[in-house]
Image (tube, rainbow, N blue to C red):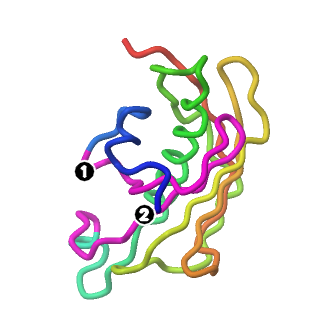
Amino acid sequence: MALMDKEQIMEIIPHRDPFLLIDTIEELEPGIRVVATKYMDPDSFWFKGHFPGYPVTPGVLMVEMLAQAGAVCALSMPENKGKLALFGGIDKAKFRRQVQPGDTLRLEVEMTKVRGRFGCGTGKATVEGERAVSCEITFALGDPQ
């Protein structure tokens, strides 16, 4: 059973459909690590055009999924409640496996450094234990306007 569902995730991060790209939080240590999932519904908006006849999840969306999971981790800390997590950078992104309709992506993010309003994390996404993507993410925390 999931620790958080979409409704609970939306209480932490501001993303909404069609751009809320994580379904559940399975494990969470606020400010330390998170494990989330995303089921690749065959009706997901990106499959219609990427690519017709051979649907594949775009790598940039998988990085965004990792970033959203990381945002839940960072914004679950009481001192960050109500803030926004914004991309500061993406490094060392590696794409190793295609992710197709019907796959479930397991998203794991571990915070490596958090100082004030800035932080870094390492992320990896797998399908049935096989690595699909890994990267380093830098983020900044800000207040909504």
Q: Amino acid at mark 1?
A: Pro
Secondary structure category for the residue under label 1: loop
Above or below, 120 against 47 in this view is above
> How many residues crowd mark 1 within 10 Å: few (<14), some (14–19), many (20+)?
few
Q: Nearer the viewer, mark 1 or mark 2?
A: 2
> How many residues crowd mark 2 within 10 Å: few (<14), some (14–19), many (20+)?
many
Membership of 87 in magenta stretch? no
Above or below, 88 against 53 in this view is above
Of the numbered discs 1 and 2, the one sitting upstream in the chain is: 1
Foreground of the two, 90 or 72: 72
Secondary structure category for the residue under label 2: strand
Q: Position of residue 126 (x, y in %)?
A: 59, 72
Q: Check contact, mark 1 vs mark 2: CB within 8 A.
A: no
Membership of 23 in magenta stretch? yes
Which quadrant: the C terminus?
Answer: top left
Q: Quadrant of residue 129?
A: bottom right
Describe residue 66's horizontal placement relative to residue 41 as left or right.
Answer: right
- Residue at (38, 53) in percent of width and height: 21
Q: Position of residue 142 (x, y in %)?
A: 52, 18
- Residue at (42, 66) in percent of width and height: 58
Task: Say the numbered circle drawn on residue 38.
Answer: 2
Q: Amino acid at mark 2?
A: Lys
Task: Say the numbered circle drawn on residue 96.
Answer: none
- Residue at (59, 56) in percent of width and height: 35
Describe residue 102's horizontal placement relative to residue 97 as left or right.
Answer: left
Describe residue 105's horizontal placement relative to residue 56 as left or right.
Answer: right
Above or below, 102 against 13 in this view is below
- Residue at (47, 51) in percent of width and height: 64
What stretch of residues is rendered in magenta? Answer: 17-46
Task: Say the numbered circle drawn on residue 18.
Answer: 1
